[in-house]
Image (tube, grey):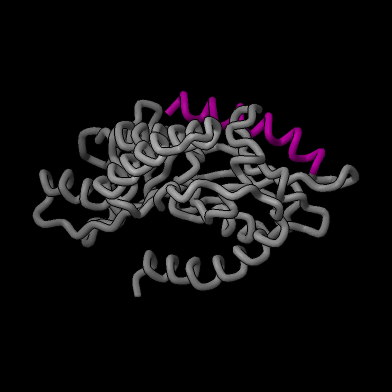
Amino acid sequence: MSPFNARRSVYAVFGRRIALGAIALMASGIASSASAQLPRKTATRSELEEAATRLRQSAQGTKDASARAALLKQEQRIRQRLQEGDFQAGHRILLSVYGDSALSDTFTVRADRKLLLPNLPPLSVVGVLDSELEPFLTTQLSKYLKSPTVRAQGLLRVSILGAVGQPGFYSFPMDFALTDVVMEAGGPDAGADMNRAEIRRSGSVAIDKKGMQEAFRLGLTLNDVGVRPGDELVIPGGSNSKWQRVATIAGVVTGLAWTVSALVR
């Protein structure tokens, strides 16, 4: 079994069985959502387009104004993803090209959203979905190599702060479930308040606690909710938790560091 498949197997069997149960119990009291839900990362472009259409139709048939607004927001998110693609500055791509050691490495998407590979012109990844990454790179590399065998996986580096067992920086596949992300960091500790978890970006809240509650409940991935490189997943603890103070300071520092890093690439 290849490293790519082995990694996915471990994530699927170990992470999700434990994480979904543990976090679902802690993030209780979440309101029910509309039946139309965001698709998982692995959806094809046509499936995403179909999902966006269903969301629009559901919104048109919904009388409740808040529910209609939520459905339209989800539709907008999907259509923006279809147009812009999944890869932002700072995303990393684990690439393996059979027989070519120079191209078998981890490469970072630059600030101009281009991928710089050895001895090749820059490749723009604007508009490329994560599910399209491998065939896209195969097509591009076929212009310069004869019948290349390509494996590729998008990676996302985030910091996990607050009331978890092992706070720190982590790199995850873009299709990694948020529940699994928490478990990879040692899981929520005894004082964790999962109902107040949020995603922060450069010192500001990018995804609030209500959005995170829904994401945990639906088993959404990092990509589903629009997490970007350098974001912080913060899980508050009790008022006496030392990690509560660490999260506040580290959130500002890591946000600035990632902003500078993306600009200089």
Query: Picture quarter containing residue 78?
Result: top left
Residue 221 point in image, percent of width and height: 49, 51
Q: Please determine whether, in this image, residue 215 is positioned above or below residue 119.
A: below
Q: Please determine whether, in this image, residue 218 is positioned above or below residue 223.
A: below
Position of the C terminus by quadrant: top left
Magenta run includes residue 176: no
Residue at 63% x, 55% y is 182
Front in this rendered view, residue 257 or 80 = 80
Magenta run includes residue 247: yes
Residue 99 point in image, percent of width and height: 21, 61
The part of the chain drawn in magenta is 244-265
Front in this rendered view, residue 186 or 21 = 21
Residue at 50% x, 42% y is 225
The total of numbered circles placed on residues is: 0
Query: Picture quarter containing residue 209?
Result: top right
Front in this rendered view, residue 163 or 141 = 163
Principal SS element in the magenta part? helix
Residue 105 point in image, percent of width and height: 35, 52
